[in-house]
């Protein structure tokens, strides 16, 4: 049922361009996340990393290139994106098909030791608030003392006037960069659905649509509160442009 390397390459490359439309300064955000992980794992010889909502392996492959001795477990519930990642980036990570937040999802990861870091980009906002709260607590238990959860995403400000301003700054930057001209999310999925090589994977994906949640609208302050409640005693943004942030939560020693 797998896809060819040429097909996977084409769709992953189109995915990368499409994502640039939505993720402000995407490469810089990836770099900042890698900077954090490299710093907190500097004393380890083979850090264990978990990529949450990995898609086709965009973040995992960048972390693997930056930290070739790291063991990376990449998890997603989308069979199509996972297959594209396994085919195009086969050595970047061990890909796991499971639904983040579901009963037993952490058992499916097959972790033999505590995590040094968990990372995510533009994925956790799909979780409902109760599921996110539970997931944050589960991740705190999986991480070693001093381990980190690093989440790059759009977090609106809790003050409406400030939220409008940060969103406007982000939109203006996207207009100047030209990324708003890239293929959008809907167009990518519509085009991919026409590829006969992906037909079986689309069938599987359709069967899982009921498990997909709606975007939560949590603010940066909401995420910080949930993380502290889950056992992350130190939480701070380390990068921001507009409403796009990299938020780091550190598990207590």
Image (cartoon, rainbow, N blue to C red):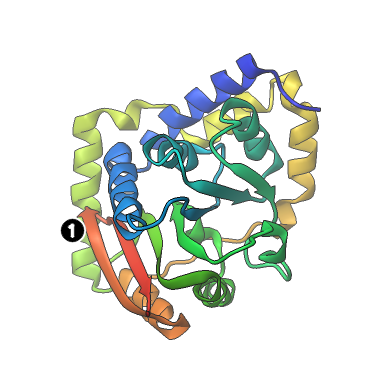
Q: What quarter of the picture does the N terminus occupy?
A: top right
Label 1 sits on a secondary structure element that is helix
Q: Is residue 190 left or right of residue 66?
A: right
The residue that mark 1 highlights is: 165
Residue 148: x and y in percent read 39, 65
In this rendering, the count of numbered labels is 1
Q: Is residue 9 left or right of residue 222?
A: right
What residue do we see at 37% from left, 38% from top? 66
What residue do we see at 43% from left, 51% from top? 45
Q: What quarter of the picture does the C terminus occupy?
A: bottom left
Residue in the foreground of this view, choosing between 189 and 144: 144
Residue 202: x and y in percent read 74, 35
Residue 184: x and y in percent read 46, 33
Q: Is residue 79 left or right of residue 174?
A: right
Residue 234 vs 177, above or below: the answer is below
Residue 61: x and y in percent read 47, 36
Q: Quadrant of residue 194?
A: top right
Q: Quadrant of residue 174?
A: top left
Q: Is residue 202 left or right of residue 43?
A: right
């Amino acid at each position: 049922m797998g896809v060819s390397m040429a097909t996977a390459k084409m769709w992953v490359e189109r995915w990368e361009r499409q994502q640039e439309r939505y993720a402000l300064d995407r490469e810089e955000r990836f770099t900042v996340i890698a900077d954090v992980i490299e710093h907190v794992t500097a004393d380890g010889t083979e850090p264990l990393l978990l990529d949450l909502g990995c898609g086709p392996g965009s973040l995992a492959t960048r972390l693997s290139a930056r930290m070739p001795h790291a063991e990376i477990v990449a998890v997603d519930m989308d069979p199509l994106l996972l297959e594209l990642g396994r085919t195009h980036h086969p050595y970047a990570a061990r890909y796991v098909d499971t639904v983040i937040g579901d009963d037993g999802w952490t058992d499916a990861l097959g972790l033999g030791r505590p995590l040094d870091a968990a990372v995510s980009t533009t994925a956790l906002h799909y979780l409902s608030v109760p599921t996110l709260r539970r997931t944050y607590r589960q991740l705190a238990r999986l991480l070693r003392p001093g381990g980190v959860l690093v989440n790059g995403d759009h977090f609106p400000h809790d003050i409406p006037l400030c939220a409008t301003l940060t969103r406007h700054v982000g939109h203006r930057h996207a207009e100047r960069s030209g990324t708003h001209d890239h293929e959008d999310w809907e167009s990518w999925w519509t085009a991919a659905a026409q590829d006969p090589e992906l037909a079986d994977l689309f069938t599987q994906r359709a069967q899982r649509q009921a498990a997909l949640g709606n975007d939560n609208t949590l603010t940066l302050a909401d995420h910080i509160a949930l993380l502290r409640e889950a056992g992350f005693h130190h939480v701070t943004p380390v990068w921001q442009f507009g409403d796009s942030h990299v938020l780091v939560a550190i598990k207590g020693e």
